[in-house]
Image (cartoon, coloured by chain):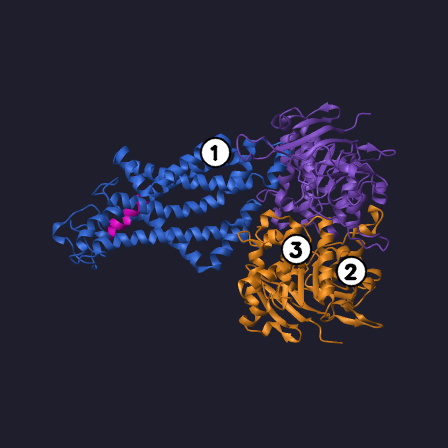
Chain colours: A purple, B blue, C orange
Amino acid sequence: MTALLETRGLTRHFAMPRPSPFAPHQFLHAVDDVDLTIAAGEAVGLVGESGCGKSTLSRIVSRLLDPTGGELLLEGRRISDMPAARFARSAERRKIQMVFQDPTESLNPRFTVFNLIADPLRMLDPPSSAAELRRRVEEAATAVNLPLALLDRLPHQLSGGQKARVGIARALVVEPRLLVLDEPTSALDVSVQATVLQLLDRLRRERGIALLFVSHDLNVVRLLCSRIVVMYLGQIVESGPAQDVYAAPAHPYTRALISAIPTLRADRGERIKLEGDPQSPVSPPPHRCRFAGRCPIEQPLCTRTAPELRELDEGRRARCHFAGE
Amino acid sequence: MTPLMRDRLDTVRHVLFGNPLNLLAFGLFLLILLTALLAPALVPHDPLRTNAQSALQGPSARFWFGTDQLGRDIFSRVMVATRLDLLIAFGAVILSGMIGSLVGAMIGFWGGFWDGVVSRLVDVLMAFPLFVLAMALVAALGNTVVNVVYATAVVNLPFYIRLARGEMRVRRSLGYVEAARVGGSGDWRILTRFLMPAMAAPLVIQASVNLGWAVLNAAGLSFLGLGVRPPTPEWGIMVAEGARYISSGQWWVAVFPGLALMVTVFTFNLMGDALRDILDPRLRT
Amino acid sequence: MSTPVLSVRDLTVDFATRRGPVHVLDGVSFDVGAGEIMGIIGESGSGKSVTAYAVMGILEHAARIRSGEILFEGQDVLKMTRRRRDAWRGRDASIIFQNPRTALNPIRSVGAQIADVISRHAPAPAAEIRARTLEALRQVRIPDPERRLRAYPFELSGGLCQRIGIAIALACRPRLLIADEPTTGLDVTTQAVIMDLIRSLARERGLSVVLITHDLALASEYCDRLAIMHAGHVVEIAPTAELIARPHHPYAAKLLRSVPSLVDELSQLQAIEGSLPDLRRTDLPPCRFAERCERRTAACDAGRLRLEPVAGQPSRLLACRNPL
């Protein structure tokens, strides 16, 4: 069965400004050779810290950014070689929608809630009449538990949780197949976060919408997603079923990440401290592991050969010479 | 009434009645506007009528601001001049505002080659002392009122271009622009429907302060004999004509038009502050 | 019990706004002992940052302190003259902020910023100031301090900037450090390092720390005692382990159940119904959580609510008439 979304060798490099016209170009490897598959109705969590490339990847997947290499396939059809402007007008645009991190910044302060939700609908799936438009907007609002009375309000009159829900309603109204969520709950209070997470889960189950949930918070991702993908400096370093990765991480970075998260549980282990600064993402040397220099289990091999992403067991992969040890 | 309008009116009410200066600003502005509209119909004397016998008389019950060297009533002339001065100022500001903000928005949004070209042109324009540039333009284009408007507009363009460009560069990477792209909007729609209306506030504020400068500019040009010609009543000319009488003690000929200029510029500046209070979203609670 | 380093008593603060006064804090009281790490937990709008700024005396212009005392080692800070307060701030008590890069002056080198604080409170010849600046950098474990002296904030990572912030705050060896969401916005691996640093510095020097955060899990790892705030009220104060194991206040209990790291299934996560009351209202009920609370009784509306010790648990304070 064709996956809903697939990336093959997806790469995004940014050219850095050169000190002189004679110096060679340096490139920032924001995303390097990423293979990602998302099945219909699946919730995949994309985890990593700042600079790992997850935000860039999420924007490539939602076609806000063009890749510099590799391909992006939606339902088997390649969408990565179409220029972004043409994609925006195609029928495919509505199939991938995005929910943004900061609800305050991502809602146009001059539009009413009604218009915020209606605008993508008008552009991507224009309904036949004003009444039909209203019906669909109201349906999207109800689906996210947004009281219809709020439709006439302006964003600054809403609470954080309500704004987050408007962001979801707006993405939902065009009936997408894939929702890319870029840290949708990190700007929200924890009490509201629960509501939004449960809402997303319900929408996924009821409507079969796949979710690509980008976050730095492994705890949240573990609850919502069935699969986790961990990124570091532009590469996937680990992937697998969420519960397995959380319970028994194979890559040393994942282990350090999990141990660094404060938790109320009494059964947490010893914290793994990562010393040193991360390597630079600009022109990384191709023959060493990008985690070398910070890795607690580093061996001489790690600076001579870069590890490949290899399959460990069923569905689990890790990019480490000593994964799982 | 849309919610946006209702929200705005609320803010207006708070701003106007919260700060007496704002109320003063708008009051004065209304007064000046009314004067411009109604003065020609309501003034006690014909502003163009000369009368050698009443020349250079001080302020009196008959001639509230006194008379000038040709016996014309200064009060009537000052009041009637309001219309011309405001017309020139508004004309110049609207022209430069609209063209400047569109150009600035476009280069701010797309950047690239044209941004470089236009920005350098703006730099060149701003390297000149602006008043001298205005003078040069009027002299080159011809000594008419319309050319004063054009010259003032050209001289003001850089401010709007820069302002619009700056605002656009800040906003073009905002979250809701990305959201609009995902929602199927193309560049042009994002520019016109989302970003330019958001820029309106700082532009309007700039324009209101600019109005003060434009009035001064027009008056300054006509003071030097460019643009408006006598006997048309206009504050600049009147100050020019009256200047030579100050040393002989007939201060009223120059002072009253000067005061009118001062009050007008002051009002526009105050209004700029008041508008900023109303329109600046950061001040919203 | 020795005098607490910080004792906030019945602090009530309003903000004057265009649409009337906002009752941001109402009767906030808590103590911080010497060498203790106290956590103040609250969501947005709880007033936790306002409390911190009130203690440091850096509230914004629109803030009005209506009543209350802020006792630092027994002395009421609110009654100090402006000059004494300025001298006190930075020398006896310090604060570090969220978003370290923006809290630093972008156009001065970090070494200069540390030196500024030192020379303000303890003027000395330049060579000695430099030595003390380097010492401050070493204390926060910044490698290669001589080179970093001349660095500017934009050249440093978020974690390093926060360390500089800590260095500035601790340069004059204060007895109290207020940390207002010091790690929000930092990567979780960096967060762990920064919090460990703060904790070890506090233990080494007997420094009292007030950690302000919305992250209950973070606070539970590092704090000795927790104070939970809601809508300008302190609702419960207790030693960390006891509060986490057995919260008495309904809001505290709900807060614990909304933390993702504590549950195994999404369905076990609980949201908190309703939203914060509008703090501009003049008819706010005595308990500001009452309108969202299932345990509300008539007693809850009867008269002002105070933090009171719980029978049998001397170290726990509670402001609730129908606790769990």
Residue B4 screen position, x and y as percent: 56, 46
Is A93 part of what is drawn in magenta? no
Q: Looking at the picture, how far across and down is residue A324, in whole percent?
A: 85, 40
Q: Are marks 2 and 3 on the same chain?
A: yes
Q: Residues within 10 Å of mark 1 (few under 14, many from 20)?
A: some
Front position among marks 2 and 1? 1
Chain letter for mark 2, please: C
Image depth: mark 2 or mark 3 in front: 3
Mark 3, residue position: C163
The residue sitting at 49% across, 55% down in the picture is B15
Residue B115 bears which disc, if any? 1
Q: Residue at x 85, y 56 (%)?
A: A266
Where are the magenta residues, as a range? B75-85
Q: Amino acid at mark 2?
A: Ala
Q: CA–CA distance between discs 1 and 3?
A: 40 Å
**Mark 2 or mark 3, earlier in chain:** 3
Relative to residue A228, is residue C68 depicted above or below? Answer: below
Q: Which of A59 and C125 lies nearest the eye of the viewer?
A: C125
